[in-house]
Amino acid sequence: MVCVDNVSIQVLVSPLPQAEFANTSPNCIGSQVCYTDLSTTNLGYIEKWKWEFGDGSMQTVWFPFNQNVCHAFVDAAVSHIVRLTVTSSTGCSHFIEHMVSSVPLPVANFDFSTIRCAGQLVQFSDLSQTNGGGPVTSWLWNFGDPSSGANNTSTLQNPAHIFMTSGTYNVMVIISNTSNCVDTVVKSITINQIPLLINSPLSKQICNNTNTNISLISDVTGALFTWTATGSSGLVTGFYNNATPSGLLDQTLVNSGFTIETVTYHITPHANGCDGPVTDYIVTVYPSPNLSNTPPSKQICNNTATNITLTSILQELYLPGQPLDPRCWLLDSWIMLFQRLH
């Protein structure tokens, strides 16, 4: 005889929750990506969200806290597989994966003029790279020169700026591409001082056939000088232009006449690629002394004094307020003495 019995058990099969999410886009490398949970369940409620960002990072959120999160990838990859796993109150789980792309940042860079002088335009050249992202579309420059007022900034790609004062300035440019991804670079730039000729006085008196021997002085250490020269007449010679920078103006000037002549040197200082303003230096060249008695002869009787007063061209040319090199007068005296003895 076979004995049979039956029993019925009700089994409740819960439906899986449906995981889904959306994320912000476009996303720049290094910036936060924000995720919005779109998951649903037909039974119970979702009590846990597990986010895995594809860069080794993860975050778990439990109900009733906000399941929408933001995350910045810890590496520089341009794409990541992000997974969201949701678990319902019935213990059922489901996951979804999406690829999240990141836009590479542009790389900011620039160059500037090799010659940089106070009060003169300095040209800046944009050297930024797209770096695989979209084209660079905007530039914001700050020249670190607040005294220039509104001219301290520019939105041009290749601007120019005048720094009125020598010194070191920190110049910054911020660039952005079509995805609004930005990069910044700061570079130091040295602005050089404009050199000046500071000899005082700017004049000198010399005798005929004498070297000028002038040491030129500037307010900038190491400055050298070029010059052009002009004479007051054709009677003064020995001067010439100098296009090779030098610190010594040493020329032998000859005054072949009997009048005071001058040579004017138009001197330009140079330092660190900067040219200073032209300054005039005047050299006065006195003629050689010459016996100027007229007539140059005299008749006297025997045993009579000559009683001749000798005069020189230099004595006639000398004027108060025009100091003369004593050597010229010494030479004059020797000539007059020679004339008296002979």
Image (tube, helix red, strand yellow):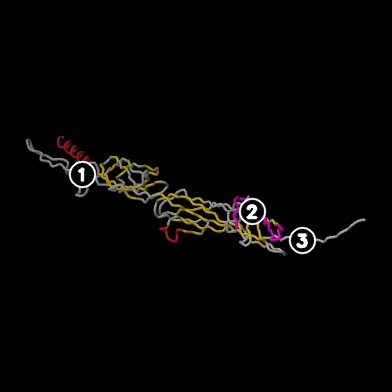
Please give the residue where the numbered disc 2 appears in the rendered image.
53
**Direction left: furthest residue:** 303
Main structural element of the magenta stretch: helix, strand or loop?
strand
Residue at position x 56%, y 52% from top? 107
Q: Could you say which quadrant of the image residue 31 lies in?
A: bottom right
Badge count = 3
Q: Is residue 14 left or right of residue 316?
A: right
Q: Is residue 115 left or right of residue 231?
A: right
Please give the residue where the numbered disc 1 appears in the rendered image.
314
Q: Is residue 247 above or below residue 79?
A: above
Q: What amino acid type should be assigned to the residue bearing mark 1?
A: Leu
> What's the distance in space between the residues labelled 3 and 2, CA to CA?
31 Å
Which badge, 3 or 2, comes first in the chain's sequence?
A: 3
The boundaries of the magenta stretch are 70-94
Residue at position x 82%, y 61% from top? 8
> Is residue 167 magenta-colored?
no
Q: What amino acid type should be assigned to the residue bearing mark 2?
A: Phe
x and y percent of residue 301 in the render?
Answer: 8, 38
| Mark 3 surroundings within 10 Å by alpha-carbon count, few (fewer than 14), some (14 through 19), many (20 or more) | few
Q: Could you say which quadrant of the image residue 146 lies in?
A: bottom left
Q: What amino acid type should be assigned to the residue bearing mark 3?
A: Val
> Which of the image's four quarters has the C terminus?
top left
> What's the distance in space between the residues labelled 3 and 1, CA to CA?
131 Å
Q: Is residue 212 left or right of residue 77?
A: left
Q: Nearer the viewer, mark 1 or mark 2?
A: 2
| Mark 1 surroundings within 10 Å by alpha-carbon count, few (fewer than 14), some (14 through 19), many (20 or more) | many
Q: Nearer the viewer, mark 3 or mark 1?
A: 3
